[in-house]
Amino acid sequence: MNHPAHPLFFIVLFAFHFSLILPCRAQVPYQFDFNQDCRKAYEEIIKLKLNTGKIILEAEKKAHPNNLIPYFLDNYIDFFTLYFNEDPEEYKRRIPSLEARLALMKKGDPSSPFYLFTRSVIYFQWAAVDIKFGERWNAAWAFRKSFLTSSENLQKFPDFQPSRMLQGSMQVAASTIPPGYQWLSSLLGIHGTIDAGMHNLESMLYNADPYAIIFHDEAAFYFLYLKFYILNQREEVFDYIHHQNWDTRNNYLFAYLIANLSLNNQDASVTEEIISQLNHDPGYLDMATWDMQIGYAKADRLDKESVVYLERFVGRFKGKFYVKDVLQKISWIYYLNHEPEKAKAARAQILVLGNTETDADKQALKEAESDRWPNEVLLRARLLDDGGYYSKALLILAGKQPSSFSDPTDQLEYNYRIGRIYDAMNRKTEALVAYQEALRLGANRHEYYGARAALQIGYIYEIRGDKKNALIYFKKVLEMKSHDYKNALDQKAKAGIERCAEG
């Protein structure tokens, strides 16, 4: 399992931040003018070339002090900086800008579609940021405000395509809230379906409207993540990416997108290639996440050099998400290289660093607390399988069978792992046999293997067009309790149920 919100909003944070107050020019009304300079700044910011974008925005503010768009785009800079780097000091420094920025947007022309759209984006971005900093209620209410503001804007301006980008993304997210959080969805008044949400996104992506073209790359980012994780249409995602011919050397956002999706699609070699070719111009956002991603990719081919990158990530990263998971990978690599003291030292750090907001971090902590080390053969096969090195993983398991392992946990993992390898190699019949055995053995255990096996069986039946059986197995996932990765697997199963029910 690898990596990709819910939660009152700050009522009043601070008075207007002095850097956001516009010069008073009563004779010139405030405007939403997405002019050429603003478009250029937005293009640079979306590439995560934030310093370059900021320079353009500051020049635009001086040239047109009553234009609100530069201040709106400032929020993108705050969002990307905080979301990717999770620096608590940066969060404290930048959060006073939020209320001032929202107030500035209200000074614009209410007859403009940007009047509500700018605020809906600001709420949306801060909802994601607040999740990263543990502000769950703030995030939930910001998400609600974004959803309602976006809905209102879409009603008033149905032809304004950027609102479809935002509304569609939130509709899909709302439709897949895990069952345990449905009360929150009802409380916040957030609702949606996968079909409606994806339709909104696609209608914008393939629209020739000028604003649809401006926001196309941002919409594609949301679209591909949702298509990958929620619709499970992985081949379609990479077909789309292939036909775009994106410049991943100079566009960090697309580089991150493809590197991350490739890693989660068991194609670690692509992740390594993309990150190794990045343009290191100082204008780009400095991100520790590159070390994490390439460290994972190298670990997946059992490369000891992976610890260099993963340890550098732990040293540089100011946030808490995935820190325990990274430390677990470090401990595994040392363990596989027969360096027990270093493996134990990395495991000890799992107990004190990071948090358990993600299922991967929860599982890492659980393993560290158990003091049980994985079976070495199964761990090698797991990492190779995760990286897409299926033949090597199968070779590791050659001659093995469940009875080769004395521990029931290892017997369960063996069945699950061999199923995943066969599944990836398109040997679906053999995969189903192994998955069924993993489901039988793991149905009432705390490891995730049984639930994930049920999910994979559902996927196989769904691809075959047998939605009746797919639904049976997706529902089995939801029925299984108290296992690792519960929230993540439930969300995937719920999305599968909705896809099959709608179909």
Image (cartoon, helix red, strand yellow):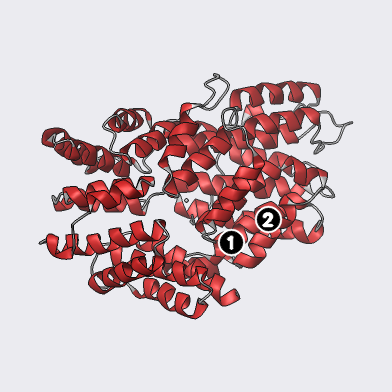
**Residue type at numbered disc 1:** Val
Q: CA distance from mark 2 to mark 1?
A: 10 Å
Is residue 214 something that shows in the picture?
Answer: yes
Q: Secondary structure at mark 1?
A: helix
Which residue lies at the image location 89% right of the left edge and 31% below the top edge? 27
Query: Is 75 situated left or right of 299 in this image?
Result: right
Q: In which quadrant is the C terminus drawn?
A: bottom right
Q: Number of numbered discs present?
A: 2
State if disc 1 and disc 2 touch (CB < 8 Å). yes
Which residue lies at the image location 47% right of the left edge and 77% below the top edge? 471
Q: Residues within 10 Å of mark 2 (few under 14, many from 20)?
A: many
Residue 172, which numbered label?
A: 1
Residue 280 place in picture, x, y as percent: 52, 21
Indicate whether 416 appears above or below 14: below
Res 63 quadrant in image: top right
Q: Secondary structure at mark 2?
A: helix
Indicate whether 497 appears above or below 377: below
Q: Nearer the viewer, residue 191 or 110?
A: 191
Residue 235 place in picture, x, y as percent: 54, 54
Residue 201, which numbered label?
A: 2
